Amino acid sequence: MLRYDSPASDWDSALPLGNGRLGAMVYGGVHRETLRLNEESVWYGGPMNRTPVGAKYHLKHLRELIRAGKHRDAEALVGKRFLATPKSMRHYEPLGTCMVDFEYPNEQSGSGSTEDVVKDYRRSLDLARAETVVQYTVNGTQVRREVITTHADNVIAFRVVASREVTFRISLTRMSDVEWEVNEFLDSIEVIDERIVLHATSGGKGSNSLCLVAGAQIHGEGAIQIVGRELEVTTKEALVVLAAHTQYRHSDVQQAAMSDLEIALRTGSEKLWQRHVSNWQSLFNRMSIQLFPDNTQLATSERLKNTRDPGLVALYHTYARYLLLSCSSSYPKALPANLQGIWNPTFQPPWGSKFTININLQMNYWAAHVSNLSECELPLFELLERMAVNGKRTASEIWGCRGWCAHHCTDIFGDTESQDRWMPSTLWPLGGAWLCTHVWDHYSFTGDKALLTRMAPVLKGCIDFLLDFLIDDSNGQYLITNPSLSPENTFLHKESQEKGVFCEGSTMDMEIIRQVFTHFLLISSVLGAQCASQDCVSAVESALSRLPPITISPKTGTIQEWGLNDYEETELGHRHVSHLYALHPGNTITTSSDPTLVKAAKKTLVRRLEHGGGHTGWSRAWLINFWARLRQPAECQKNIKALLKDSTLPNMLDNHPPFQIDGNFGGAAGITECLVQSHEETQSENTGCSARLIRLLPSCPAEWKKGKIQGVRCRGGFEIDFEWEDGHIHDPVRIKSLFGHEAILVFHSVGSDALDTGVKVKVPAVQGEHTIRRDV
């Protein structure tokens, strides 16, 4: 639970609610409650055709310039021929704002007072109930306010209970959170049948029109009056309901929103809350992490001052699960979590609040499976299917390739062209390929063969593009990408002394392709001819054998970022650590693999940190995952402390700065990686086939001496519960095998690092629940 002893002074202190589609930031003011509202499909404008037609005819020349090290000329050619127009795809916008202004009776006269006496103020977000609660006393009147955003009934519900009658006015608007902004971005506000109805068009050709409605219901005595275009309520107990829709799902948005509102009001507050909590807990209660001591009674602002508090780390993880379930749920035409999840207060959001796919959207789902919330990832695949359709034109017109591709951003419409004109990020056609790695990963946790079958054509299109896009290196030995880049980073070319962006076969490119090819072969082994022909499988096997290895710099002992070229970095503390993709989220580098690569990975991380790396929230979260995979608990603890201290806002949302939600999800994934890992495989002693290796407490910091984890999911279809105290795991470990696969469970101890081989115990290849004891 998040607790505060004062109202939110700004958005960074407000508390988030969401049902996947609708979101609200609740401020908890005494005299004015502010709810900043979002709906996931409120985006500026409609789909566009931005493809730079004919770019493919200049590809050969571009590749020649890059190979020759003529970086200025290469960038000039890219700017002229390869970038999309308009340069920006669509961006996300707020739904609107609901304000509730309160007047309280004076203790003596019963009239309103401008000098109200407020006592015993408390504000909280109950993660287990997905409910904000504000409690206080004003002039002797006790007030309790509760807000939920319910998936079960598809509305935002606001309940007010007071010991004496209070009066409050409900109003809707659609303004930016910028304090000097005075424009209302809406078409109309009307009162229809005692309901406030706001219509707006988010702007631009083909925009999704929206309708936001508000209605109220009183319990017992009281009255509801229409005052201008507001509702005034006087009562001791009332329910306020907000509903909204856009033309993304409904042609008649007012009818859809009104229907949701009327049904909710007829249902009543008690049933709304019961249905909401039951629905929420059926998913949220599947998994939990507890670390002790846990100072649960302290205000969150006080807890954030002590970054060594294990209970705060567990709260951070719990909060991330709460956020994921709140901003990414499965239903028809669902959208995945964007750069801000679902919570955006401004009409000009940072980076457009788009789906950034050179790490950020992917990171949003790193914690989904291990946290037993695999359903939350399903909207990602709906978006991926739209991208695969649009990306065919992109692949053909820009790159002269079959299949489909996407660059480093996308939007609600699955736009696959380049975004903006910033060279270090813009022309990178592997964003879609990275997203495709989520297909096999989803299957490895869930065994969902139907999804695998559904996504096979998308993956096949990605494979066709990659096979066509790869070319021979200058020696004809390896297959590489050209143009290539390492997202958002730059280098200095030794011979020409030019600062460069484009290279051949960056390490990240080749590791993404290696993983996509490997996953494709695994999927083909499951689906057979449903996935691809034998000729396609053979082509992938041949291409996979010709990808270059990860290269270590002889100068620095670190992994080379730009593939086979040992270029000098221009920003040693860069936020992206793309050349360690093979360590995380990939699994080419593990602590049981080539020790020279492990050593080089450590040096790479140390070098980044020594020069200021990890200075954004999401990049700090990525560092936690790297160190966890390297099984370095002391480094994990350092970076978790830094994430909490430097990159966490008062409401515990991640601070890039400004707010980006990927750091919350990446941080939660890293915390779980400290406690459980399942990315490795080993050889079965019985069959000689591969068996899943599951490590318990592989990177658990020494400070986390006592804890409990329930419902954590692992690759291979395993679900595990265990406890530890005084640094050691208690017998027995409870493990549920969903698929009946064989696994090896490895017991580690708190504070142990990669030198600890642990105690290995076999999990039998039998479906069902098992109790596993350490064999000592």
Image (cartoon, rainbow, N blue to C red):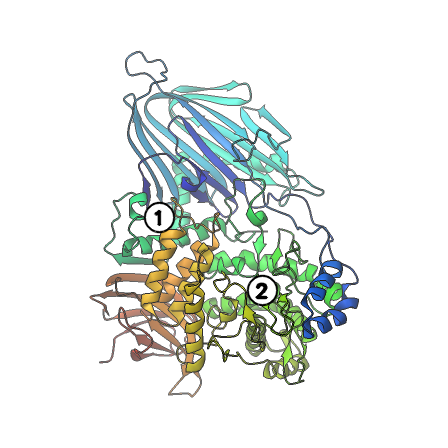
Q: Residue at x 44, y 55 (%)?
A: 617
Q: Nearer the viewer, mark 2 or mark 1?
A: 2
Q: Amino acid at mark 1?
A: Ala
- Residue drawn 55% across the image and 35% down it: 176
Could you say whether the residue bearing mark 1 is in a helix, strand or loop? loop
Quadrant holding the C terminus? bottom left
Q: CA distance from mark 2 to mark 1?
A: 45 Å
Q: What amino acid type is highlighted by mark number 2?
A: Thr
In the rendered structure, find residue 128 and report the number of the disc placed on it: 1
What residue would you read off at disc 2? 490
Choose between 182 and 189: the one closer to the eye. 182
Image coordinates for residue 294, horizontal then vertical, percent: 25, 53
Is 21 in front, or is 70?
70
Q: Can I make out residue 549 in this image?
A: yes
Residue 744 percent coordinates (x, y) = 35, 78
Find residue 284 and name its label: none
Q: Secondary structure at mark 2?
A: loop
Say if 750 sits above or below 97 in the image. below
Classify mark 2: residues with Cα within 10 Å, few (<14), some (14-19) or many (20+). Answer: many
Identified at 51% across, 32% down, the residue is 179
Res 433 quadrant in image: bottom right
Q: How far across and how far down the image is residue 581, in percent?
A: 50, 70
